[in-house]
Amino acid sequence: MTRLGMLTPSSNTVLEPVTGAMLRNLPDVTAHFSRFKVTEIALTQEALGQFDDSEILRAAELLAHAKVDAIAWNGTSASWLGFDRDERLCERIEAATGIAACTSVLAFREIFERTAARRIGLVTPYRSDVQEKIKTNWRAAGFDCVAERHLQLRDNFAFAAITEAQIDQLVREVVREGCDAVAIVCTNMRGAAVAAAVERDLGTPVYDSIATTLWKSLSVTGVDTRRVQGWGGVFEMGTRPQDAVPAPAAVERGAP
């Protein structure tokens, strides 16, 4: 049995059921979730403080009690805070728990690099200032957001009310403007379900945050991602032997 640990924003109601649906045909893989407080997405001091590593680490240590095989930060804050934030977070989780760690945003970067995607279509529910911060950070990493749509929302709970039809429309709009791939950046939006249909109809890869997190979590634990069917081409990339990351030896496996 493979157990995947997921760190979850407290007000998120989408990623748990969607992750479960994607794993429905993998009876040997289970997902387990630990929450910490996230209620709004903004650039205010209070909102940014929600992503302090200490709060996330406490949630990660609780997942370690379940002896999970990987711990993923299933959130997209490093999109506007910087890739280095998630790099440091993974290092700290692994040091504290002895369990391999990954994140949604680092998975996006890896996918773009593996597929040579440089012109990105960006779809989010966020406000304009957050959207601009994402574009700036991603451009510095070599990924130019050449087409984008955002919905000017701030309340994290409200993101779940965006319908699949709305997301589908936004994704198709940025594809038609021209891009190598679409990134749906938010783990409380129902983007995973629209990826396969858009890819089939328009031929452009669509990478949803929840799907990319699961893809990387499976890869880290050595599970063949191609076993996940019907949720977009990201899973067709499969798992390379070098993707499986052994837990650091310094901490006893699964220790709190």
Image (cartoon, rainbow, N blue to C red):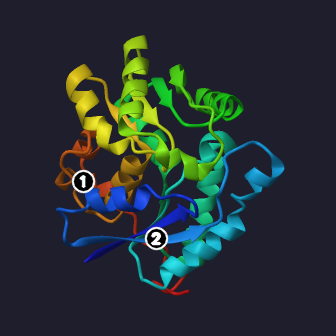
Q: Is residue 130 above or below residue 105?
A: above
Where residue 212 appears, x then y in whole percent? Answer: 39, 47
Using residue 52 as the reference point, say whether residue 23 is left or right of it: left
Residue beneath disc 1: 225
Q: In this orientation, which residue lies closer to the viewer: 201 or 106?
A: 201
**Numbered disc total:** 2
Residue 184, quarter of the rendered image: top left
Q: Nearer the viewer, mark 1 or mark 2?
A: 2
Q: How far apart are marks 1 and 2 (CA)?
A: 20 Å
Q: Classify mark 1: residues with Cα within 10 Å, few (<14), some (14-19) or many (20+).
A: many
Circles 1 and 2 in contact, beta carbons < 8 Å: no
Where residue 109 appears, x then y in whole percent? Answer: 48, 40
* Amino acid type assigned to the residue bearing label 2 in the image: Phe
Where residue 156 appears, x then y in whole percent? Answer: 60, 50
Residue beneath disc 2: 33
Quarter of the image where the C terminus is located: bottom right
Quarter of the image where the N terminus is located: bottom left
Q: Classify mark 2: residues with Cα within 10 Å, few (<14), some (14-19) or many (20+).
A: some
Q: Is residue 42 above or below residue 130?
A: below
Residue 246, quarter of the rendered image: bottom left
Q: Is residue 224 above or below residue 232?
A: below
